[in-house]
Image (spheres, rainbow, N blue to C red):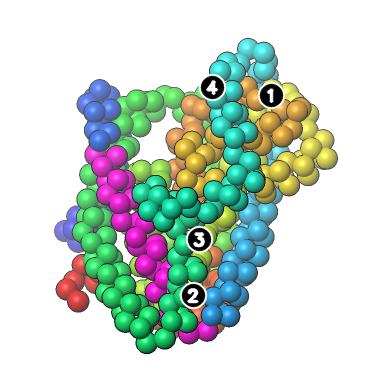
Amino acid sequence: MSKFLRAVYGQVVIALILGVAIGMVFPETAVALKPLGDGFLKLIKMIVAPLVFFVIVTGIAGAGDLKKVGRVGVKCLVYFEALTTLALIVGIVLAYAVQPGAGMNVDPATLDAKDAAGFAKTATDTTIAKFLLNLIPDTITDAFARGDILQIMVFAIPFGFALALGGETAHHVVKVIDAVLHSLFRMMGFIVRLAPLGVLGAIGFTVGKYGIHSLAPLAMLLVVFYLACLTFVLVVLGLILRGAGLSIFRLIAYLKDELLIVAGTASSDAVIPQIMGKLEHLGISKATVGIVIPTGYSFNLDGFSIYLTLAVVFIAQATNTVLSTGDLIALLFVSLLTSKGAHGVPGSALVILAATLTANPALPLAGLGLVLAVDWFMGIGRALTNLVGNCVATVVIAAWERDLDRAKAQSVLSGDDDYLAEVAAPA
């Protein structure tokens, strides 16, 4: 018991239970706890930008074979597209198998379209051309100030290549950057110790503001969504990871601290630094981790993809809108485009859902209001599935590149490995 209480995951579990209890019994007090969650997320975001930058730069500069870096990037995109398509299909199949919206008989004319219109306007402002242009930062400092991971990558990748080709002088720069990176990981270890407070504030606010009762009207949608995510993680990702010689259950156990933090904050951003450190500790090279994880956070959103097609079909069923086979095929292709780059867009799930609904005139945009009440709770499932999906992607691509130390990975996943103690220890 004492070991459970000392561990971060044990403290986070207790914080989750306390947050729910306070939210139900003292809702006003629970809402006032929101700054704890916001503060924890701000501490994490404070360190994410420089950490991602240094990991990518040192990874590429120390890779030796620059062609390998290019191969990893191409394999990332191929893998991401394949898994995103599969996740979108899982959402459609389960939506039709269970039909969570059937029988609701909602008249679209009775829905309040005001909120939906706001998300739709944001969606139309986020075109593919603007997304591509936004990959290029206006200035280097602007990308770091806003914590835009993709923009930081656009700067970090060529900088890493420049250092790799820079000879002895560049080698000294890489050594300095590597020393800074180790200090950042140690600092991250200190911040993660505050995770229970952040989770207490975030979950307490959610339950206090919306209440457990707010889930009742859309309980079936939530059940189907979490069933879809669980099926995707344990079956699809489990089989893929088994091909790399590892167990999905042991990987989830290894990531339990991070998954609990994500469950409490509904944000996978809160664990980017820890995840990158843990994957390196698993026996994957810094270069592979530095390319796959940041790219995956924008292009490999498995949980978000499941949500997108499931929500669209749910809205169609709830409003008795018939979708033809052609409509479903169009939905699949539109979703493949709209789901990219959703990370980092404020209210991204609802914005991208609005964009997807707008692309099909048969679907009522006002139907977006049907999922607003449970979006936060679905956001937890999206973030958890996205996180596991990106960790599996990193392991699989590393194995594909023969860049995974399987013996070390098996040892780490099988043993009682105190990763936080290692990163927090003096160098």
What main secondary structure does the magenta stretch of the protein show? helix
Q: Position of residue 58 (x, y in %)?
A: 39, 74
Nearest-to-viewer mark from 4 and 1: 4
Closer to the N terminus: mark 3 or mark 1? 3
Q: Give how far apart the Cα atoms at labels 2 and 1 are.
A: 48 Å
**In this rendering, the label closer to the viewer, 2 or 1:** 2
Residue at x 40% of width, y 50% of height = 142
What is the spatial separation of the Cα atoms under label 4 and label 1, in whole angstroms?
Answer: 13 Å
Per the image, label 3 sits on a secondary structure element best described as helix
On the image, which quarter does residue 323 sit in? top right
Spatial CA distance of label 2 from label 3 is 12 Å
Q: Which mark is residue 161?
A: 2
Residue at far top of view = 110
**Label 3 to label 4: alpha-carbon separation:** 34 Å
- Whichever of callouts 4 and 2 sits on the residue coming sooner in the sequence is 4
The residue under label 3 is 154
What's the amino acid at mark 2? Phe
Are the residues tagged 4 and 2 within 8 Å (C-beta)? Answer: no
Residue at position x 58%, y 69% from top? 73
Kindly identify which residue carries mark 4: 115
Q: Earlier in the sequence, mark 4 or mark 1?
A: 4
Image coords of residue 331 (percent x, y): 73, 41
Q: Earlier in the sequence, mark 3 or mark 4?
A: 4
The secondary structure type at the circle numbered 1 is loop
Asked if the residue at tag 4 contacts the one at tag 3, i.e. Cβ–Cβ closer than 8 Å, the answer is no
Q: Circle 1 is placed at which residue position?
A: 364
Q: Quadrant of residue 352?
A: top right
For marks 4 and 2, give the one nearer the viewer: 2
